[in-house]
Image: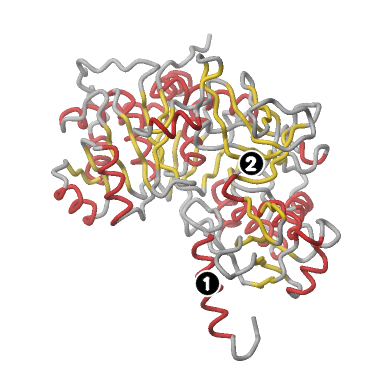
Amino acid sequence: MTRTAQLLHELLDHAAERTPHSVALSSQGSSLTYAELADASAHMAARLHQEGLRRGDRMVVTASDGIGITLLVYAASRLGAVFSVLHEQVRGAPLEHVVKDCEPELLVSDDPEVAHTAVRHELTFLRIEELVRSALDARSGTAPLLEDVGPLAVDPVSLIYTSGTTALPKAVVSTHQQVLFAATAIQTCLQYRADDVVYCPLPLSFDYGLYQVFLAALSGARLHLGTVVEAGPPLLRSLETAGATVLPGVPSVADRLAWLLRRNAGKLSKLRLLTNTGAALSDSTMSALREALPQLRVQVMYGLTECKRAAIMPPDGDLTHPGSCGIPLPGTEVFVIGDDGERLPPGEIGQFVVRGANVMAGYWRRPELTAERFPRAEGLFPELRTGDYGWQDKEGYLYFSGRRDDLYKERGFRLSATEVEAAATRVDGVTSAAVLPPEGKRAALLAVVADITADEVLDGMQEHIEPFKIPRRCVRLDALPVNGNGKVDRKELAALIGKATAASSSTGAL
């Protein structure tokens, strides 16, 4: 009988008991079995304990080594410590903010600049390469018994820093039981298999990437950790080489794959499942993927860091419920409220509210913001007021209209950047699109990657959206800039368009 994990690292230990010799992780020529990963993480925990990490202490990791990050995550869980994984490029003021905010005991990285930050704040700095090497070298020995650790399921295990409507990133606090509930509910919907090879092109600092580690352990699948370079032009070849059967993607990854498949005779006969979150996939991308890969199934998802995942579509559910982002996870509830906080009937647009054990514990040291976003129904059960707007049909399917910070007003109308972008990508010849909301004297602007002219894009959109919602200006680009998580970087997009506009102002080429 399969045992239920109560603590995060028990996911790994149970997988190691079930299939000790199955490959758990692989990356650029190196790999670890589940037994090796579990053993190395236990030795890693002993080393971190030796360095002073104790139950309740925080550890910040900023590095590119996915296997090392995985070992550190499970090691922190064994100690009852709290990990925070940051993108490898987080440096300077953003790193200073995190250090001051969560007051870690340890900083772990592969960058000497982070060592300087540790010195300034009188923190212990550890190099991830040395930690991983010592943990792997010690695998043949017995890991020392750790005393006085004993984390509980209700203890926090991670801090995930996320941006939003606040000036500085805030950390979402997740307990062991919340992470495990979310991962188990997601696995119930996605059904990863023991013979799957999950190709992850996403950084583990992105919770969507990190949860692939937990989903793999639940299913016994092999997780292949891709690199940023592999997710670019070599993506098709990388998937073929890895023998990928599952691809957790974001729109930029799916768009890239569709583009490559249009121009190459890639087989990818093993790829059976593509999941997507972060933003909606364009109809053209999904059509291209299905045409090139008839065996592929697509599962669209919707979620936030504050609850990990709120809704998932059944496989290919977008074909029967176009525009939907899914139905609530098993054991959870999602409903829609109006401005007065009362529930709205099906079909009416309001704010999504999530209830269930996937709702995280709140924000680290942000009591006022926690009270605002995580109110307690009848004073007892926390809910998540997502700040996302949409509607729900009679069958329970959710339809996302836009985020609170995605909505803007122009010409007297309240508009959604997400809705406008979706309409643009429905135009034949448009690969991807992003809206820059109005700012100062600048009106809303639409940026597209397309094989047709900007005027043709705007004309074509009239078949898919009301004319008053269409931005007056459209700009064609070779590619949309994305951040480390694969999402459109609107700040960089604004700067890119500003430079292009200045350069072409005399010719009118833009």
| 4 sits to left or right of 290 | left
Determine which residue is flagged by label 1: 496
Q: Earlier in the sequence, mark 1 or mark 2?
A: 2
Helix, strand or loop status at disc 1: helix
Please name the residue shown 32% across and 30% down the image.
82
- Residue 429 is situated, as x and y percent measured from the top left of the image, at 77, 66
Residue visible at 68% across and 30% down in the picture: 336
**10 Å crowding of disc 1: few (<14), some (14-19), many (20+):** some
- Whole-percent x, y for residue 211 in the image: 49, 35
Q: Secondary structure at mark 2?
A: strand
Horizontal arrangement in the rendering, residue 74 relative to residue 44 (left or right): right
Residue beneath disc 2: 275
Position of the C terminus by quadrant: bottom right
| Residue drawn 77% across the image and 40% down it | 318
Task: Looking at this view, name the residue that lies furthest to the bottom.
Answer: 506
Q: Position of residue 194 (x, y in %)?
A: 57, 28
Reply above or below: 34 against 304.
above
Q: Would you say the residues marked 1 and 2 are in contact, meaning their CB atoms lie under 8 Å apart?
A: no
Q: CA distance from mark 1 to mark 2?
A: 30 Å
- State the image coordinates of residue 392 (x, y, percent, origin top left): 75, 32
In the image, farthest residue toward the right? 463
Nearest the camera: 150 or 379? 379
Query: Which amino acid is tagged 2?
Result: Thr
Q: Amino acid at mark 1?
A: Leu
Q: Give the label, 1 or 2, closer to the camera.
A: 1
Vertical order, 301 against 188 (above or below): below
Residue at (50% x, 57% y) in the render: 230
Q: Write down the quadrant of residue 107 in the picture.
A: top left
Q: Is 213 on the left-hand or right-hand side of 282? A: left
Query: Would you place residue 339 above or below residue 185 in this image?
Result: below
The answer to which image quadrant residue 334 occupies is top right
